[in-house]
Amino acid sequence: MLLKIGLVVLGVVILYVVVQVLLYKRDMKKTKEDLLTFVTKNNKDVSVTIIENDDVVLEWNADQKTPLASTVKLVVLFHFVKAVSSGIKLEEKVALSDVERFYIDRTDGGAHKYWLEVNDFSEHVSLLDVARCSKRNDASEFKCLYGLFY
């Protein structure tokens, strides 16, 4: 079972890296003007600070909380697999209030609220349910998993 989980995780990580390399190559063709156009079109949803040679050359909504990038999921996924490998049972139930303790409001674009709405949880939720997250691809439940294990 652990071998299957490991192979699936390895496959997901390899796929993620390949996609990121392709996106990186595409993004390397973009200019500062492309970034400014994006910020202008999405000014309420973007927080950007660019520093070149210790000089701030662009700062927009620097203190505004915005959703975390999905990259954080890799770190949490690693710790999740490590926890499962060391004996954590996915069927184990945890109090929903414990999951809520690690949620940071307004950092996931509403995905956590959606996850709670589409899954009719009572007072407890299995670790597998938390690991599945929502269908909106958010990072908040991964942060919750990290908090529950460490």
Image (cartoon, helix red, strand yellow):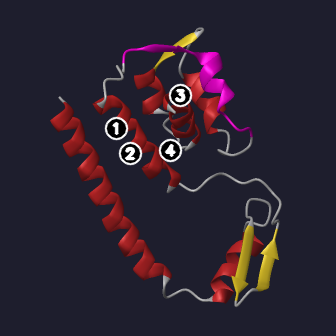
Compare marks 4 and 3 and give the one earlier in the sequence: 4
Provide the residue span drawn in magenta. 91-105
Q: Residue at point 56% right, 13% down?
A: 121
Query: In the image, 117: left or right of 130?
Result: right
Horizontal and vertical percent position of residue 138: 55, 43
Type of amino acid at the residue the image marks with label 4: Asn
Decide: marks 3, 1 in contact (CB < 8 A)? no
Q: Residue 18 lies in magenta, yes or no? A: no
Type of amino acid at the residue the image marks with label 3: Leu
Q: Nearer the viewer, mark 4 or mark 3?
A: 3
Horizontal and vertical percent position of residue 133: 49, 33
Q: Circle 1 sits in a helix, a strand or a loop, which is it?
A: helix
Q: Which residue is mark 3?
A: 148
Cα–Cα gap, marks 1 and 2: 5 Å
Cα–Cα gap, marks 3 and 1: 13 Å
Horizontal and vertical percent position of residue 3: 16, 37
Q: Residue at point 61% right, 38% down?
A: 111
Q: Which residue is mark 4?
A: 137
| Above-or-below relation of 91 to 102 | above
Q: Residue at point 81% right, 57% down?
A: 64
Decide: marks 1, 4 in contact (CB < 8 A)? no
Q: Which residue is mark 1?
A: 81
Decide: marks 1, 2 in contact (CB < 8 A)? yes
Compare marks 1 and 4 and give the one earlier in the sequence: 1
Mark identifier at residue 78 = 2
Compare marks 3 and 1 and give the one earlier in the sequence: 1
Q: Please identify the quarter of the rendering in which residue 24 is found.
A: bottom left
